[in-house]
Image (tube, rainbow, N blue to C red):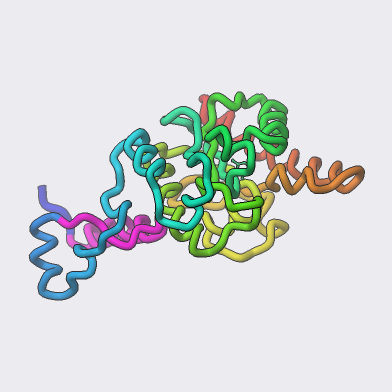
Amino acid sequence: MLRKIDQLIDELDAWLRFHKKMGLEALPASPGVKSFISSTDNSLINAKDAFTKPPGSLEALQKAALECTRCRLHETRHNVVFGEGPANARLMLVGEAPGKEEDLTGRPFVGASGQLLTKMLNAIEIDRQEVFITSILKCRPPGNRAPKADEIRACMPILMTQIELIRPKLILALGNVAAHNLLNTKEGLKKLRGKFHSLNGIKLLVTYHPAYILRFAGQRQKALKIEAWNDLQLLQREYKKLEV
Ligand code: URA
């Protein structure tokens, strides 16, 4: 089948940009591509990156992630918290990084913020079991400190490959770290909340991280919960549309 070169260029361009956004610095090259590139730049083929060859299944990706030593956090972690949920989940939740309980159990969002997250989902009639829950970092930063830029860079390919494999219809980014790194922006949550963004065609909504909500008490916490509730209403509306 012949294809128009212009259309191929557009498709190839979109495909390469997607993988770049995924954090991949190199892709496996076919013999044809190799012979073409070898006359110009060998670095693409020679890059020795654990995720150069994107794993073809979630299980294979998890296996690779469990053995990951791409950043310093592997030295202090008890468990890699890969994430959990159906491999064909329509909704994916992305947090920041595992905390103490998550590190000890290997499961995402099982501590106090996880309990609030489960309540938030239940409030919009979504069962935790039907969504895929993960975070930007898969290993706990010691003492729950903020993730460092090089840790995020090292870990993003896992998340972006999860997204590529699961192909969710909706993503809920929980908090600044998730929103900034998925949308490649530094905008504040105030600006990012309340509307759907697009991550390679996937609708992405931003809301507060439950741990942030729990940092406050009284009226401030109540106000944040109301704002989060407004975000969740938007999410519920889109999620329900997927059922029809
Ligand atoms: N906070 C996160 O962002 N992720 C977890 O898995 C737990 C708490």
The answer to whether 38 is drawn above or below residue 234 in the figure is below
Which residue is painted at 68% across and 26% down in the image? 122
Which quarter of the frame holds ligand 1?
Answer: top right
Residue 188 in the image, given as x and y percentages of width and height: 68, 62
Along the viewing direction, whichever of 10 and 20 lies nearer the viewer: 20
Q: Which percent across, then down, holds residue 184?
A: 52, 62
Magenta stretch: includes residue 84? no
Question: Which of the 4 image quarters holds residue 125?
Answer: top right
Q: Position of residue 187 (x, y in %)?
A: 64, 64
List x then y, in percent, for residue 195: 64, 50
* Residue at figure coordinates x 50%, y 46% from the top left: 138
Instruction: Count every numbered label the image shows and give the total.
Output: 0
Looking at the image, the residue that sits furthest to the right is: 219
**Residue 168 horizontal side relative to residue 33, left or right:** right
Q: Quadrant of residue 210?
A: top right
Provide the residue span drawn in magenta. Answer: 5-29
| Farthest-out residue, front | 75
**Which quadrant would residue 35 be assigned to in this image?**
bottom left
Please name the residue shown 70% across and 48% down the image.
Answer: 208
- The structure residue drawn at horizontal position 78% and vertical position 43%, both measured from the top left corner, is 214
Residue toward you, 59 or 63: 63
Tell me if 196 is positioned left or right of 202 in this view. right
* Residue 150 versus residue 240 in the image, above or below: below
Most prominent secondary structure in the magenta stretch? Answer: helix
Locate residue 120 relative to residue 196 in the image: left or right. Answer: right
15 drawn magenta: yes
